[in-house]
Image: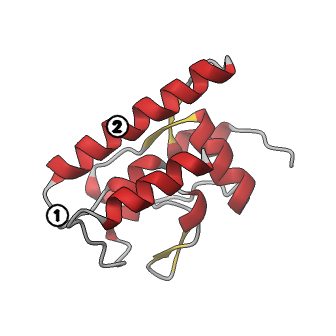
Amino acid sequence: MREIYRDLARDLLQNTLTCLGCGDCCHLEQWGHELWMTHLELYVLISEHGLRRPTPGGTCPYLREKRCDARTGRALGCRVFFCRDPHQQAERLYETYLNRIRELAGETGVDLYYGELLRSLGHVEYRP
């Protein structure tokens, strides 16, 4: 997963996508947005930044003072979402790297499961 995220970071640098760091996208319910991710992404997020339970209002619990507090472990959907840029580039990158996650799961014999971030954080049990 780290290699996939590292390659995506390199590809993002080569595109014209820009994040203003405003934290608006982390207010999921306010945007009418659900952040879906694989359980492999969820595992990376929790293992690197701890398990944080969702709070009322539908804001990502990893948002701190308008900044993502989990930048290195954040999900693919977070990495490619740029609220003020055209979504075509982001969608292409998302599909490319989701396919790499699927390939990784297949190569390692792991069944791939998907879940919405806030619901998943509310139900997951994690023991480091």
Q: Which mark is residue 96?
A: 2
- Residue at coordinates 54% horizontally, 40% vertically from top-left? 119
Where residue 124 sits: x, y (%)? 70, 38
Is residue 110 something one can see in this rendering?
A: yes
* The one of 123 and 109 positioned closer to us in this rendering: 109
Does residue 9 appear to the left or right of 69 in the view shown? left
> Is residue 32 depicted above or below 104 in this figure?
below
Residue appearing at x 16%, y 63% in the figure? 85
Q: Quadrant of residue 109?
A: top right
Determine crowd level at label 2: few under 14, some 14-19, many 20+ residues with C-alpha closer than 10 A: few
Mark 2 vs mark 1, foreground winner is: 2
Between 17 and 28, the one nearer to me in the picture: 17
Q: Is residue 110 above or below residue 100?
A: above
The image shows residue 121, relative to residue 30, as above or below, that is above
Classify mark 2: helix, strand or loop: helix
- In the image, is residue 126 above or below residue 9? above
Q: In which quadrant will I find the N terminus? A: top right
* Relative horizontal placement of residue 52, taking residue 55 as reference (left or right): right
Looking at the image, which is closer to me, 18 or 13?
13
The disc at residue 107 is none
Q: CA distance from mark 2 to mark 1?
A: 18 Å
Question: What residue lies at 33% left-to-right and 67% top-to-bottom?
Answer: 13
What amino acid type is highlighted by mark number 2?
Answer: Thr
For disc 1, the neighbor class at 10 Å (few under 14, some 14 to 19, many from 20) is few
Q: Please report contact status of discs 2 and 1: CB closer than 8 Å, yes or no.
A: no
Q: Does residue 45 appear left or right of residue 87 in this picture?
A: right
Residue 110 percent coordinates (x, y): 66, 20
Residue 76 position in % (x across, y down): 44, 48
Q: Amino acid at mark 1?
A: Asp
Q: Position of residue 22 (x, y in %)?
A: 34, 78
Residue that badge 1 annotates: 85
